[in-house]
Amino acid sequence: MSKNSEKNIQMENIVSLAKRRGFIYPGSDVYGGLSGTWDYGPLGVTLKRNIMQLWWKMFVDDREDMYGVDAAILMNQKVWQASGHVDTFVDPLCEDTVNHRRFRTDHILKDNGIDADGLTMEQMDALIEEKGIKSPDGNPLSKSRTFNMMFETHVGASTDATSVSYLRPETAQGIFTNYKNVVDNFYPDLPFGLAQQGKAFRNEISPRDFIFRSREFEQMEIEYFVNPENWEEAFDALLADTHKFLEALGLPSEKIHELEVAEADRAHYSKRTIDIEYDFPIGKEELLGIAYRTDFDLMNIQNNAGKSMEYTIKGTNTKFVPHVIEPSFGVERAVMAVLAAAYTEDEVNGEKRIVMKFPEHLAPVKYCVSPLLKNKPELVEKAREVYQILKKKHGNVLWDDNGNIGKRYRRQDEIGTPYCVVVDFDSLDNNDVTIRDRDTTEQKRVAIAEL
Ligand code: GAP
């Protein structure tokens, strides 16, 4: 089997498990779906929240220099004009000249083994012509044109140019527009950061690879405001903190790679970008990025809104517009990396099993409690007691008395429950339970009082 088809199978297994076990479903599935949208089921939403809460704890709660915000998704259209998104947030789009299906030109090149990074649209078109590349349906392709990825909408009852707004394509701008509010309210010392988590929307030409490239997704972003003299120090420190977060997600360090993004490939606002790439089952792809956005955004606001964005160093008359380091994390990509890292197939007593080896602090279910036999009321009663104790303490505790104990273990392995607690006949005499470890499958007896 080729490496590629092995990877496809691994990805398909993860997608299938995600649907079968209630992690992630295709969006609007009952109506035939809506491309590029995904819904989180009961286990997926908990996994996603655990990841987002861990990020918030590590980057906001545990630090003295970070403040949280939660800005509106709809913003004044001037935000997106000033940020450059109206003019430059575009992808190259080409069309199958026969059936009119549309594709991202760089993706067409990539699928034909050509890296389009840094190429202009004209250079991409020239390559397509020179190599005789056809659409995936075998038809000639049109010349490319730019396609703006922002979802446009109208605010209020009128639908003229003044009512245009956009579903935000990044959370970052909601941070920049609140920078002055936080400075005036909290007088933070420089450097300091503003953090935000929330939805972002991009009308991707070709959403693909499960949740990796979606049209609706979540971001976790920090704008870290610094004295321009110290930007490199802050960049390195945030990069190091990012690696600590990825370690806490349980991602193996050998699958994490830093890519120094070349000038031609950087976003228009960035003077330096490091992309963190991850060896996903679909290949080595971008997980997140850290960019040095200079004073690009605050100067844009200052110039377009006519309000000073200057920061005054406390006790001095020194004023300047701070520069910004921006670590930008995609939640869906973090979820996909965590799912891929956790997905394991092994054998227990000669039987194949699928086990999701989530780090304990991310597992959507922490404990599963069951009576050895569900038709013995005394076992059920005792097990319910244990369940209530654990539920009160840990919240994410599951009750499962379906099927035999082996089947229950397999089910819990598939959703990554670290511990299965079973009440048996000895429990009635000794006030203890067996606890089975997901990874080693070893069982030990523990007193209920010590749970
Ligand atoms: N504020 C900077 C910014 O938005 P970006 O590189 O365009 O930078 C940041 O996006 C991160 O958001 C990416 O590294 C990725 O994790 C995530 N992301 C971007 N587009 C995405 C999409 N269509 N689907 C899922 N995640 C996406």
Image (tube, rainbow, N blue to C red):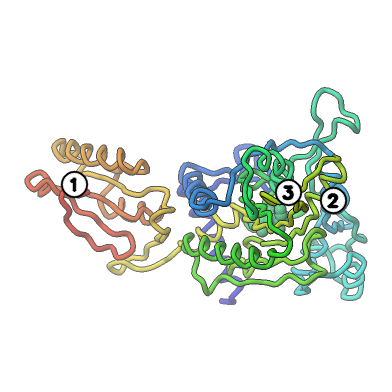
Q: Secondary structure at mark 3?
A: strand
| Rendered location of residue 116, percent (x, y) | 80, 70
Neighbourhood count class around disc 2 (C-alpha, 10 Å): few under 14, some 14–19, many 20 upward = some
State the residue at coordinates (70%, 41%).
178
Neighbourhood count class around disc 1 (C-alpha, 10 Å): few under 14, some 14–19, many 20 upward = many
Q: Which residue is mark 3?
A: 311
Q: What is the number of the mark on residue 84?
A: 2
Total marks placed:
3
**Residue 383 as seen in the image, left or right of residue 302:** left
**Looking at mark 3, is its residue's CB closer than 8 Å to ligand 1?**
no
Q: Secondary structure at mark 2?
A: loop
- Quarter residue 151 falls in: top right
**Residue 275 as seen in the image, left or right of residue 410:** right
Q: Which residue is mark 1?
A: 423
**Looking at mark 2, is its residue's CB closer than 8 Å to ligand 1?**
no
State the residue at coordinates (60%, 65%).
239
**Residue 326 as seen in the image, left or right of residue 271:** left
State how far apart marks 1 and 2 are (Cα).
62 Å
| Rendered location of residue 38, percent (x, y) | 61, 46
Give the residue type that dot 1 points to.
Answer: Val
- Viewer-nearest residue: 40 or 220: 220
State the residue at coordinates (51%, 64%).
244
State how far apart marks 2 and 3 are (Cα).
24 Å
- Viewer-nearest residue: 244 or 65: 65
* Nearer mark to the viewer, of 2 and 3: 3
Mark 2 near mark 3, Cβ–Cβ under 8 Å? no
| Rendered location of residue 203, percent (x, y) | 76, 47
Whether residue 100 is visible, yes or no, is: yes
* Nearer mark to the viewer, of 1 and 2: 2
